[in-house]
Amino acid sequence: MMRQSTSLILFIIACLVSVLAFTPSTPVQADPATLSATPTSLAATVELGNTATLSLTITNTGSNSLTLLLYTGYPPTASPARMALPSLPVPLPQQAERIDPALQTELAHGPTRFLVFFADRPDLGAALLIRDWAARGEYVYHTLTEHAERSQRAVRAMLDAAGIRYTPLWIVNALLVEGDATLAQALADHADVAMLSADHELQVAPSALTTAVSCSPSANNVCWNIDRIRADRVWREFGVTGEGITVANIDSGVQYTHPALIGQYRGNLGGGVFDHNYNWFDPVGNTVAPTAAGNHGTHVMGTMVSNPPDQPAMGVAPGARWIAARACDTMSCLDSNIIAAAQWILAPTDLNGHNPRPSMRPHILNNSWAFNSGGNPIYTGYTAAWKAAGIFTTFAAGNTGNTTCSTIASPGDYADVVAVGAIQQDDRLASFSAIGPTGDGRIKPDLVAPGVGIYSTDASTGYIALSGTSMAAPHVAGTVALLWSANPQLIGDYDATYALLTSTAFPITGDTSFMGASHSACRPIDVPNNIYGYGRLDAFAAVAAAKVDIPWLILPPTPTATLTSSGNTTLSITLDARKVPGPGVYSARLLIYANNLTDPPLAVPITMTVPSRSTHATITGTVTDSETGRPLPATITTTDGVRLMTSPTGTYSLTVPGSSTQHVTATAVGFVTQTQTITPGNGSTSTLNFALDPIRPRLTTLQDVIPATVDFQQNVTLNLSLRNDGNAPLSYTVQIDNEPYGVWRSDEPDGPSGGWIDPPTGRQVLNLGDDGNSDAIDLGFDFPFGSTFYRQVYIGANGIIAFAPFTTGYFIPSCFPLSETTSAAISPLHVDFNSLYGGEISFAQVSSGALITWDDVPLYGTTRRLSVQALLQPNGVIRFHYRNVADLQPTDQATIGLQFDDQSQHVACDAGDELPLDLSDGLVIELRPQINPRAWLDIESGDSGTLAASSQTNIPLTARWVGPMYTTSQARVQIRSNDPQKPVATVRVQLNEGTPAPYQVFILFVFR
C-alpha cells in the first residue's frame, strides 16, 4: 500500500499516530463545590477618611474538602434585552476534488484507510453566550457528538450492513473507514458525504535548534526570557502564579516525573499518589502515565509551568496545573490521530477512552507545531471547536524563515488562534521565525516572544536550551494562565483576552532588516505589523490591565486551611473610605471560588455609602507635559490610598476631609513622578496642578566641529565630549563613518557658497512620468566617482542618478543601498516624486559640470512640491542644491547619499535608523572626494558606554598624519544613543596638515 506524505513543520519530536476509537458515553460530572455565606450581602455607611470592618462567615455545604480563593469584582453590567445568537460554524476542510487524488493513488494499490467528511456542519455559536465552564463544555461536546450521530446515521447503517468497521470522529463530523475503491466511490456518491480524504501521514521535520545552554539569569534569579516578558513581576507584585488554571499541549509527551513539573501535574494527588485518568492521553505508546519521546514536549511544558527546585525560574505560570496529549511518533503522524487528540482536548476521558468529561478540558492549549507553509485549512474545524468551548489556543508561527513576506505557517495563520513569532535577546526577530501577511492579507504573527536559547526542562531530570517558534508560543500560553488566574471573569473570553495581550505588548517597528525590496509587502512601519505583530509579549502589563483592584475593599489573606464538609470560616472584610475620591455609594462583589476557578463563584454583594459633609474640601487640577503643555493621561494617588485617573483633558478632582494634610502624587507613563503636599481648609476648593518632566536621557554633544592639525608623521589626541542632560541613563555607541566623500553644508562654518542654478534654455527635459527612468545620457566629460570614471548617467523620476540601467522604477522607501538599482548611484533626494502632475525633470551641461534638476515636482498623492538639483563637476565634487524643501516631512521617508559598487555613504535618511534629514530652502550640500576618515582617525577607547543623568564623559580620538594634504579632510563621528528625540547625533572632525612633509609628490600624466 502506498502512503501519501505531506510535509509538516512540527517543531515537535512526536505526534499522535494510532486512531483512538472514541466511544462517547454518558458524561460523569465532577462534584461541584458548594458554598454559602452569612450574611448574603454586606453594607455599611463609612465617613470619608474612616474605615469599617465587617464579618462574613463562609460554610462548605458540599461533600468534598476545599480551599477558598478570594477575588474582588464590580457588579455585573446589565445584559441587553435581546442579543443576537452568534454564529460559529465548524468549517469543512477544503479540497478541490470530491475524492482526494492522494487517496485515489492509494486505492489503486488496494484497500486503505481514509476519512469520510460529511457535508452537514454544526454551528457552535450559542456556546459563546454560555458563561458556566462546565455547561459550555457540555454544550459543545453534545452538539458535536449528536450532530455527528444524526448526520452520519444513513452512512453508518450502510457500513454496518456491509460489515465494514469505522471510527466516528465527531469533532469534524467525519468517519475513519478502511476499504477499497468500490467502497470509496459508493461513499463519495452518497448525498450526505462532502469529500473523501487520504489519512495523510505527516512527516515530522527536524526538531528545534539546540543552542549552547545559557539561562542568563537576572538579579532576581529568573531566566532572561522570563525577565524579558516580566512574568516574575506578576508573581512578586500581584501574587499571581497561575493558580486554578489548567494548561495542555499536544506535543511529544511530557516527562511527568521531572522535578520541575511533577508538582504541577493535575494527576498528582499528593503523597506519591497519581491519577492519570483525564490527565494523560497516549495512543502512540499506550502508556498509563505521562512520558516523552524526545525533549520537545517536556521543554515546551516547562516554559509554561515549570517550578525548578534548584535552577533559576523558567516557567511563566508555575502555579498552574498541566495535562497533556502525546500526539505523534518520532517521525510521523496521521490526520486521524490528530483528530482524536483534538477530541480528547475537548472532552478528556479515562485511560480506557471512556466516560468523557468536558468539564475537565484544559483552559489553555499550546501547539508548538505547524505546517511548512500557510493557507492550509485542514485544522480549522478543531480550532473553531476549541474556541467555542472557551479553550484559548496558541500556535507557533513556524520556522520557515523570513527572507520574504508571507512565510507564516498553518494553523498559526488562522484567525481564531494566536500565532507567536520568536525574538532574540536583543528583541530582533530570529532568522527562522515566519512572518506575514497571510494569504488573504491578514496581519500575522499576532505577538512575538523569546524563542532563542530558551532554557527549560528536558525529558529526563535535567535542563536544555532550545530555539524555535516552538519555544516562543508557550510564553503566551503561560501568560494567559496568569491573566485568567488574576481575573477569572476572563476565562473562556477569547476576544477580551486577545485585546489585553495585544494592547499591552511592547511595540516593535522600524527594523531595517525588513525595509528592503524583498519585504515591500510587510515592512514593520506600523503597529501591528507583519514582522512583530502587536509587539513583544508583556505579561506584567497584561495582568496589570486585567486584574480587578478595588482599593476601598480590603480582603484578608486567602485561608490556607482546608474547609472540610460542613466546615466554616469567618472572614474580616474592611471597607476603607480613605481610599475613595469623595462621597458617594460604592458597590462591589466578593467572588469566592473553591479549588477550581471554572466553577461558578459564590458572589457576595458589598455596598459602602460615604456621606457628604460641609467640612469636606475639594482639590482639583490638571496634569500636563512640562515641555509641551499637552494634557497627560495620569494617575492621581494620595498617601491614604486614593487612586483615580485624569480625564482626557488631564483634569482631576477629589474630595478629602477638611484641614487634613494630603500628599498628592501624579504618575504618568514615561514621565517623572511628582508629589505635592497641601492642607485644604474646611469647605474649601484648592487647585493643585502638575507639570511632569519626561523620563528620558538627553544627549548633548559639546562640540559641533573638532579641529585637528597634524604635523608630518605625528599623531594628535582629541576629545569627543558627551553629556547626558536628561533624567535617565544614556546608553551610547560611537563609530567613525566610512565616508569616501567629505560632507560640507552651507549652514555650517567653512561651508560651501553659491546655490541654485537655473537650468539653461537648452536643457534636455525628461518626461519620466511617475516612476520612469531615462535612457543613457552623456555627461560631456569623464566623471570620477568612487574608483571609476563614468561618462553616462541614467536619471530616475524619484531622485536617483545611476551609472547603469535601473532594475525597477517603482519607489521603494529605504536607506542605502537602494532597491531600485544595484549600480553606483547618487541621490540628492530619493523620494516618491510624481512628475505626471507637474514640475520638470531636466539635464543640462553647464560651465561647472552636469546639472540634473527636479524643479517644482509634486510628491506622489499630495499637492506638495519640491525643488532639488545635483551638480556633478569634472573634479569629482558633487553639489546638492535645495530651493523648495520646507514641506518635506519625515513620513515621506526620503534619503540622501551615495552608493558605490561595494559600499554606501549615507548623508541622511528618514526611511530607517540613520541620521534624519535636516534640509532648508537655499541649503547647499557639497560632497568632496577625500581620504577615507577611517584611515586617519581612530577611537582609542570607550566606543560604547552608559552615562548617568547629568554626567559627562570624554572619549579619546587619535588623528594621524597620512601623507601630504592639499585640502581639509573631514570625518563624521556618529553617536547612537537611547535618546528618543535624537537617537543619532554627529560631530565633525576636520583634519588639516601642520608642519608639511619635507618633500613634494608629483604625479606624471601622459596624454596621447
Image (spheres, helix red, strand yellow):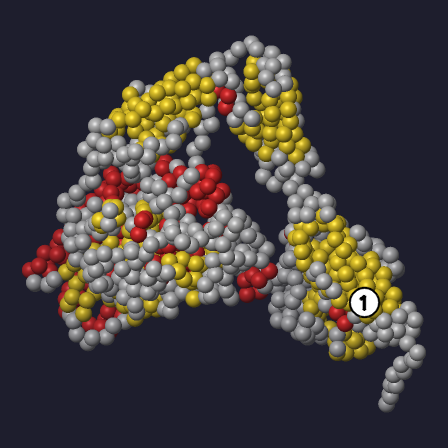
Between residues 954 and 822, which one lies in front from this camera angle?
954
Tell me where residue 520 sits by quadrant. Answer: bottom right
Left or right: residue 119 versus residue 827 is left
> Label 1: how many residues lie within 10 Å, few (<14), some (14-19) or many (20+)?
many
Along the line of sight, which residue is nearer the eye, 642 or 148? 642
Badge 1 element? strand
* Position of residue 954 measured from the top left corner of the image (x, y, whole percent): 76, 55
Question: Viewed as shown, does residue 653 lie left or right of 441?
Answer: right
| Residue under the image location 40 percent in, 51 percent down | 315
Could you say which quadrant of the image residue 966 lies in? bottom right
Q: Nearer the viewer, residue 290 or 701?
A: 290
Height in image: 87 above or below 890?
above
Please name whichever residue, 813 or 629, is drawn nearer the observer in this view of the structure: 629
Question: Is 102 situated above or below 366?
Answer: below
Q: Is residue 390 visible?
A: yes
| Residue sticking out furthest to the bottom | 1008
Could you tell me the amino acid type at mark 1?
Ala
Q: Is residue 731 left or right of residue 365?
A: right
x and y, in percent, of residue 872 in the image? 80, 69
Q: Quadrant of the N terminus?
A: bottom left
Which corner quadrant holds the C terminus?
A: bottom right
Number of numbered discs present? 1
Which residue sits at x=22%, y=42%?
Answer: 138
Q: Is residue 578 left or right of residue 197?
A: right
| x then y, percent, for residue 366 | 35, 53
- For the point 58% across and 58% down, which residue is it? 511
> Residue 507: x, y in percent?
54, 49
- Tell which residue pokes out farthest to the top in this image: 614
Let me know if residue 533 appears in the view.
Answer: no
Residue occupying the point 47% across, 56% down: 450
- The residue that label 1 is drawn on is 959
